Amino acid sequence: MAKASTQFAVVEDRDGKHMIFTTDESGRLYLIVKGEQGQSEIIDLGQKFGFTQQQSISTLAVSQNLDGTIHLVFAVQEIGKANLLFVLRPMAPQMKDWLALSGRGHFYAGPQWDITIKELLLVSPDLPLNRCETLTREGIQQ
């Protein structure tokens, strides 16, 4: 993994351990988790999903429901082409499920428009509609 970006999204697995989604400076998508021996493990989700080196993640959003279900959405960009939006089907907070991911069969499919995606925001359906928080380098904004 090259140098990590400043974009991180953190959720928890069933055991309360952090699952950190991030991209590196080249736009590869990674999942950082605590390994069996307590060390950090870095999983290249871009490779698991079959993205090429020419395809990079321009933005991502992650949310988690109260029941632990994890939602991941991200935009993929390739030089000279419009962004593609990828919406992963809701996933259980179990590491074995994330490690078993392969290919693009776990994504919703639909029409793609010729657009540029700058930012994505997901809000858990478990949150009250009048409250939305965004984590930035400066802290939590409401």
Image (spheres, rainbow, N blue to C red):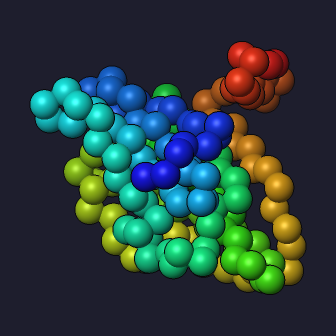
Left or right, residue 79 beside residue 51 = right
Name which quarter of the figure residue 4 lies in.
top right
- Look at 75% across and 50% down and name the residue there: 120
Left or right, residue 104 beside residue 7 = left
Q: Nearer the viewer, residue 105 or 75?
A: 75
Q: Nearer the viewer, residue 109 or 47?
A: 47
The C terminus lies in quadrant: top right
Residue 137, horizontal then vertical, whole percent: 71, 24
Left or right, residue 50 beside residue 22 = left
Residue 38, horizontal then vertical, whole percent: 19, 27
**From what the image shows, is residue 139 above or below residue 111?**
above
Left or right, residue 33 beside residue 130 = left
Residue 126, horizontal then vertical, whole percent: 61, 30
Outermost residue to the front: 2
Name which quarter of the figure residue 130 lies in.
top right
Outermost residue to the left: 37
- Look at 43% across and 52% down and name the residue there: 1
Residue 92, horizontal then vertical, whole percent: 37, 46
- Look at 80% across and 78% down and name the residue there: 82
- Look at 45% across and 42% down and name the residue there: 69
